Image (spheres, helix red, strand yellow):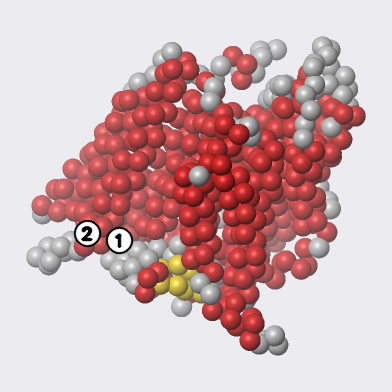
Amino acid sequence: MTAAFYALAGVALVVLGLYGLSVQAHLLRKLLAVNILGSGVFLVLVSLGGQPGAAPDPVPHAMVITGIVVAVSATALGLVLMLKVAAASGRPTLDDAPKEDRCPKE
Amino acid sequence: MPEGVSLSALAALPWDAVLILLPLTGAVAAGLWPRSARPIGLLVSAGGIPILVGLGTAVAGTDGLHHAVGGWGAPLGIELRADALSLVFLATTALVGLGVALYADSYFEPTLARWFWPLWLFLLGALNALFLSADLFNLYVTLELMGLAAVALTALGGGRAALTGAMRYLLATLLGSLVYLLGVALLYHATGTLDFGLLGQRLEAGPASRTALGLMGAGLALKTALFPFHFWLPPAHASAPAPVSALLSALVVKASFYILVRLWLELFAPLAATAATGQVLGLLGMAAILWGSWQALRQPRVKLLVAYSTVAQIGYLFLAFPLLSAAGLPDAAAWRAVLWLVLAHALAKAAMFLAAGNLLRFGGHDRITDLDCVAQRLPLTVAAFALAGVSIAGLPPTGGFIGKWLLLEAALLQGRWDLVTVMLLGGLLAAGYVFKVVGHFFTPAATRHEAQRVPARMEWTALGLAVLALLLGLAPGILLPWFDSAVVMPMAGARQ
């Protein structure tokens, strides 16, 4: 029962992350949304891993620890990129392509 | 084996582990000693080919080599597996990688080269590790390593377009791998294993496996830039430095496709309930071909045109999913054609991006209408672009032609006229966008541009890759048996 609760909470976090990623414009919020999404996935992984009553299964935990390491490095890269984007364009958002990339209206 | 001793000694070496460790060690070394980065990078890129020959010798005649890293086998440890299917992708990576590395050596200034070499070697190590992984989680880790290296490479040139392109690419790639991981979590819950071999035995049709397939398929389709998940690809591929664009289009999008092929052939296709997913992937593939080609035709700049062409060509790779044999299993002939297209597209597309890089270096821009008599001034680049374009359009006698012909044949045999029509239309449109560029090669531009010198090696490497794509079409008989076993063996393993 508790496992199912945690799994559902994980799914809710995933949905929340997806929502944030698509709705928020600020890159920091987008990165945070990805992290929330990731936490949701990890929660699902851990909560679905064990059988009720049995000893905890170490494999999902090992996976989640690896996943956290990956998420930390990805977030670090994302933050640096965000700063560079903000420095280059003046705004920490994903703008539309600059004018030269657009097709001319004929 | 006739040569006895020497060959069996070669086969005993853990080539698969070397293929992963060498680039990773090289990447760290190139990062630590920037002055030696160039020789390290070139050496490791070239080293992939002899190692692959060693691995190929060891794999030939077997149904795949398994290597338990550190003596810890499945289900707890990490297992590496090399078979004919992984060899197809490994060989593509080694060939294109070497060509692009030679090009990059002339392309980058020392300040950027310092960063290019370690990142490229990380990417190479991740790609090799991905193609050799035999469990779902290891595939996730290699996907992420590959994605991070690819994003950093995209941003290498700096500038607003490249940085925003890289940022969008990072968010897309992270989302893709997390959705894939969610699918992995469900599969682990349903089967208690991550190993492909054990999964094949334990997986049963049901809501859990269907949801997992949906999630993993969506995540990987996003990473492969299948229509309508292609939005991140054109800005990233068009704004990255030319050698990086070549690597991204030729290799990186194929890596997530490889996982999808593995999952499909070994795990999901034998479950009859997944046929609908195959049809959906086929439909998206058709949409990708039409939309990507149409967009390519409308682009004003060479690199954007080539990037949209990648969106279209990825579509062809998905046309094998809806084709099933009489027994309801994947159609081996169609899959053989798709693998052939993977190799042909990688060679031709890398050549096209490298040629586009030469045009950009030469004129300082890549606006198609402002190309200024380049045929006279950069004949090798023009030849490379045209040859690669002929292969992309699927005209004889190139590698692209053989791949598309085989795929067309498979679709015809099954009476799938919708697939046939889209393939032919896609070919026409591809010829259209290639010749749109080639036409402007021969004419002077309205305004004259100051031309910059393009190093000879940059022209020759582009031409070399294009010629390889051509040669692939001249002697298909030599390689086709290998592609046959690459398809048949995973499927045979799945049925056991």
Q: Position of residue B123 (x, y in %)?
A: 51, 48
Q: Label 2 lies in what chain?
A: A
Q: On the image, which quarter does residue A53 sit in?
A: bottom left
In the rendered view, tell whether residue B368 sits above or below residue B144: above
Q: Is residue B235 left or right of residue B25?
A: right
Q: Is residue B447 left or right of residue B228?
A: right
Along the viewing direction, whichever of B121 and A30 lies nearer the viewer? B121
Residue type for callout 2: Gly
Q: On the image, which quarter does residue A76 sit in?
A: top left
* Numbered disc 1: secondary structure: helix
Q: Label 1 lies in what chain?
A: B
Q: Position of residue B397 (x, y in %)?
A: 84, 53
Disc 2 to disc 1: CB gap under 8 Å: yes
The residue located at (35%, 41%) in the rendering is A73
Question: What residue did someone put label 2 on?
Answer: A49
* Numbered disc 2: secondary structure: helix
Residue type for callout 1: Tyr
Spatial separation of the CA atoms under disc 2 and disc 1: 7 Å
10 Å crowding of disc 1: few (<14), some (14-19), many (20+):
many
Q: Position of residue B233 (x, y in %)?
A: 55, 35
In the rendered view, tell whether residue B307 sits above or below residue B45: above
Q: Is residue B51 left or right of residue B372?
A: left
Along the viewing direction, whichever of A46 and B43 lies nearer the viewer? B43
10 Å crowding of disc 2: few (<14), some (14-19), many (20+):
many
Q: Position of residue A37 (x, y in %)?
A: 29, 39
The residue located at (68%, 58%) in the rendering is B340
Question: What residue did someone put label 1 on?
Answer: B188
Residue B292 in view in this figure: no
Quadrant where the image shows the N terminus of chain B: bottom right
